[in-house]
Amino acid sequence: MTPDRPDAAVLRAFGVAGVTPVRLDGGRGLTWRAGDVVLRPDDGATVTDWRAEVLATLAHTPAFRTSRPVATADGAWRSGGWEAWEHLDARADPSRVEDVLDAGRAFHRAIAHLERPSFLDDSASERSGDAWSRADRMAWGELPLPADPTLARLARAFRPVDLPSQLVHGDLLGNVLFAPGAPPAVIDWPPYWRPAAFGEAVAVVDAVCWHGKPTARMHTLGHGTADWPQLLVRALVFRIATLHLLGAWDAAAAAHHRPVVDAVT
């Protein structure tokens, strides 16, 4: 198990020995800043090393940038169950949904050439058993859904999606950071292999469910093709199934989500 906070050996490995880590908001309370380095529990050797190798050299554009991974003194991307990233002096702003979507599209264009990593197909990989990965597969009919009236209603609205898949960022809204005079920064990339606009749909669903965007905007934000309503349905299934798997779905959660379910069905 990864310790609650990075210890002295981890700080030394990533070049911030003697710096007292400070817990950051977000990141499920698991992310720490030490000087100019952000540390978070790694996602296992396969996923962490793959993502670091991609983002260490991914070309930035005026439309987006990313945080770069920080290697240990011996050139590894992990130490003691932790990975490290450069700290960016920027902040998330979930109210800026359109700007988040624009940055997400630029990021997806930049990674569209990447091949599907094998760990996405490996049921034994470190990531395959987490709630988010399982819920993603449920949303696309690759795993059965939990027994639940809300999910059953949404599943009845499933239709085929005629869009190509590629690597996407599955949690954009809170992971695009803004700073004056700098391109938006895309961070904390959870990779999925889905239509690029699915990442947009998840961001829109999050904005409506948790950040006050009116349900009427769901169909005008985002991809704008014939498949957009279907992507919204699957994004909502993804989020609700995740809550089920985390033990956080109850009558109050169902009532909170009901207007959004009504809007997409």
Image (cartoon, helix red, strand yellow):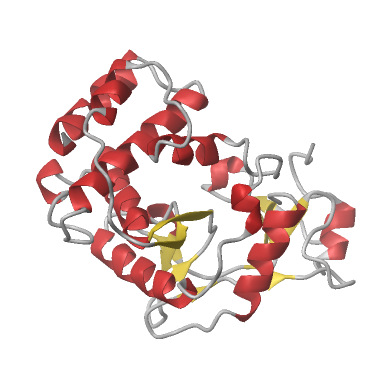
> Taking 12 as reference, is 159 left or right?
left
75 in relation to 252, above or below: below
Residue at left offset 24%, top offset 41% = 159
In the rendered image, residue 191, in percent from the top left (x then y), is placed at 53, 56
Q: Nearer the viewer, residue 153 or 83?
A: 153
The answer to whether residue 36 is seen in the rendering is: no
141 in relation to 231, above or below: above
Residue at left offset 87%, top offset 72% = 73
Residue at left offset 37%, top offset 66% = 104
> Taking 238 as reference, is 77 left or right?
right
In the rendered image, residue 101, in percent from the top left (x then y), is placed at 30, 64
In the rendered image, residue 226, in percent from the top left (x then y), is placed at 15, 56
130 in relation to 183, above or below: above
Image quadrant holding the C terminus, namely: top left
Locate residue 2: give its quadrant: top right
In the rendered image, residue 41, in percent from the top left (x then y), is placed at 70, 48
Image quadrant holding the N terminus, namely: top right
Q: Nearer the viewer, residue 39 or 17?
A: 39
The answer to whether residue 108 is seen in the rendering is: yes
Number of marks drawn:
0
Locate residue 34: give its quadrant: bottom right
Locate residue 72: give its quadrant: bottom right
